[in-house]
Image: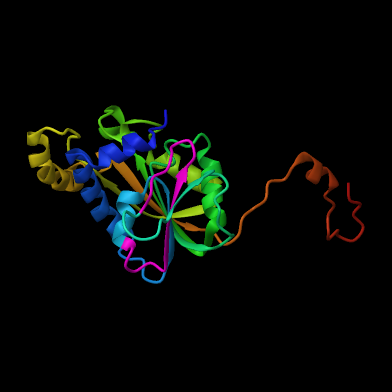
Amino acid sequence: MRVDIIDLRDFYTSPLGMRTRDYLRVALSKHMPDAKGMDVAGVGFANPFLGQYRDGAQRLMSFMPAAQGCVNWPSSGPNASVLVNEEHLPIPNAALDRVILVHALEFSPHPSNLLEEVWRVLAPGGRMIAVVPNRRGLLARIDATPFGHGRPFSKGQMIRLCRETQFAPTGWSEALHFFPSNTKLALRTSPFFERFGKTVLSPLGGVIILEATKHMFRGLPVTEGARARARPVLVPAGAVPN
């Protein structure tokens, strides 16, 4: 079940949501320290994590799926958020340097179609950074955050998804190791558990952060009709093609 825009907005303005945002911003900055001179788009609900790139990016956009809903972003200046069909992004081919997916893949009815569209809009050598709920982590089992809804992923599933859509994984990390609760005790102790989890329980983080590069060339599927029409180009002397 997809979490709608009101629930997402309300979560990230709560004490737990603000703590989640802060830890994820730090984790994302290790994969993407800055966006100087880049064209960058967020897909899903990436608004809480795009602000840190506003000063350096040449262009910064937020694409929000129609089934989720859309809010104005940023809060000051011209609006840069767009309500979209996630499988048909309103951007030309090879136009972006980076795409950040947050609250996107786990809610998409067709994750491979979404990544194929991300592949289309990325420039050659462009990179995708995807944040997804970790199937092995605690967040996927608790609905206190948006990461407890939708489809969680394992690393193996993400690798297969990348292979299907012509992306090459180049980096991994985990984040959100603290207990997801708005109680004062949980929020007060969250810095300790976030540090402890990264060093001791890293594979059990609440989310997986995948960094992947677009392959320059893609193979095209061969249909039965195309296979029937295919003929050998080079035939050894004396051989008769079938």
Q: Residue furthest bottom?
A: 37
Tell me the quarter of the picture where residue 159 sits: top left
Residue 241 % position (x, y):
89, 51
Q: Residue furthest front?
A: 77
Residue, x 60% and y 60% (percent of image)? Answer: 217
For the rendered model, the colour scheme is rainbow
Instruction: Answer yes or no: is residue 122 visible.
Output: yes
Report the number of discs.
0
Residue, x 22% and y 49% (percent of image)? Answer: 23
The secondary structure that dominates the magenta segment is loop
Front in this rendered view, residue 225 or 10: 10
Query: Taking 237 as reference, is 171 left or right?
Result: left
The segment highlighted magenta reads 53-73
Residue 122 % position (x, y):
52, 59
Front in this rendered view, residue 37 or 171: 37
Residue 199 % position (x, y):
17, 48
Query: Taking 163 as reference, is 138 left or right?
Result: left
